Image (cartoon, grey):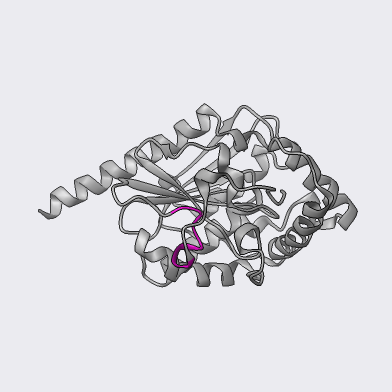
Amino acid sequence: MAQASTTSSSARPVGSATRWLLRRPAEDAAARIFCFPYAGVGASMYVGWPRQAGPAEICLLQPPGRENRLREPHYGDYESLADDLIEHLLPYLDRPFAFFGHCSGALPGYAMTLRLMQAGMPTPSTLFVSSQVAPHHGPYSRFLSMTDDELQLELAELVRALGGVPDPGLLALGLAVLRADVEATRSYRPAEPVVVPSRLTAIGWREDREITAEQMTGWSECARPDRFRQVVLPGSHYSFLSAPELLVAELAAEMTLAVAGADSSDEDRS
């Protein structure tokens, strides 16, 4: 959880029409994975990720109130975030796609899936949720009870994990974003689980001290039994930042299945 201090030259925003995406999706991608940042961070946190996972292009989502959108008002809550994002993302949902979110980034992915389902729009083939409890079991995070000073220490820790050096001015900016994001997490608790049509992959991390794999079992109530799977990967809470090989393999395998399923459907219709 942190405000990333820089944006790499290879990941510049590409204009107001796509301000929700750090880079414009490729026209020839067979599938897409849209990645939500987690609390206090912007899309450039995925700078260590590859451009592809199997047949799927990695697409980096940029919510307002951070990085190149720092001057824009914060989105407020996850339902509002989903409502605003739908119209901008819809043109890119014309092929198999997935949402990925780690920690609090998993929650807007779920909220967005619900909004698409309720609106009768395309829904993700797979929803990837990493290191987060199911929404109806939340909110759960030690960050929810932290003071500003404690949160700022966490920001500094993540900046170091991203390979940077904490800067007091940037930490102060990041703290405001983080506090607003934490409040969005605090306010998001559906009364009961809603089953999504997507496949749902819950990803735990063996050495994660924030959220254990056992705490993630509630996600099974948000998917059909035959569309849910839980995996536990080696690593700690921040290991996903470097896109470990086993994580990328999980994403690639799911999207390969999604593309194969889409191709079969096309053949059946022809």
Kindly identify the residue that appears in the image at 42 percent across and 66 percent down: 117
**Would you say 22 lies left or right of 217 here?**
left
Q: Nearer the viewer, residue 121 or 14?
A: 14
Q: Quadrant of residue 122?
A: bottom left
Residue at 67% in and 56% down: 137
Rendered location of residue 50, percent (x, y): 48, 36
Tell me the residue at 55%/30% (across/down). 244
Please tell me which residue is depicted at 60% across the width and 49% down the height of the picture. 218
Q: Position of residue 41 (x, y in %)?
A: 67, 52
226 horizontally vs 187: left or right: left
Q: Compared to 190, does 101 lie above or below?
A: above
Question: Is 245 a magenta residue?
Answer: no
Work out whether residue 241 or residue 261 is closer to the camera in this orientation and state it: 241
Vertical order, 169 against 8 (above or below): below
Q: Give the residue furthest to the left.
A: 270
- Res. 63 visible in picture: yes
Residue 110 in picture, x, y percent from top left: 53, 58
Q: Main secondary structure of the magenta part?
A: loop
Q: Position of residue 270 (x, y in %)?
A: 9, 53
Residue range corresponding to the magenta coloring: 16-23
Name the residue at the front extreme. Answer: 9
Q: How many marks?
A: 0
Q: Compare residues 225 and 56 and report the one nearer the observer.
A: 56
**Which of the pair 194/204 is nearer the observer?**
204
Horizontal side of 43 relative to 116 (left or right) equals right
| 22 falls in the magenta region | yes
Residue 182 occupies quadrant:
bottom right
Residue 237: in sight, yes or no?
Answer: no
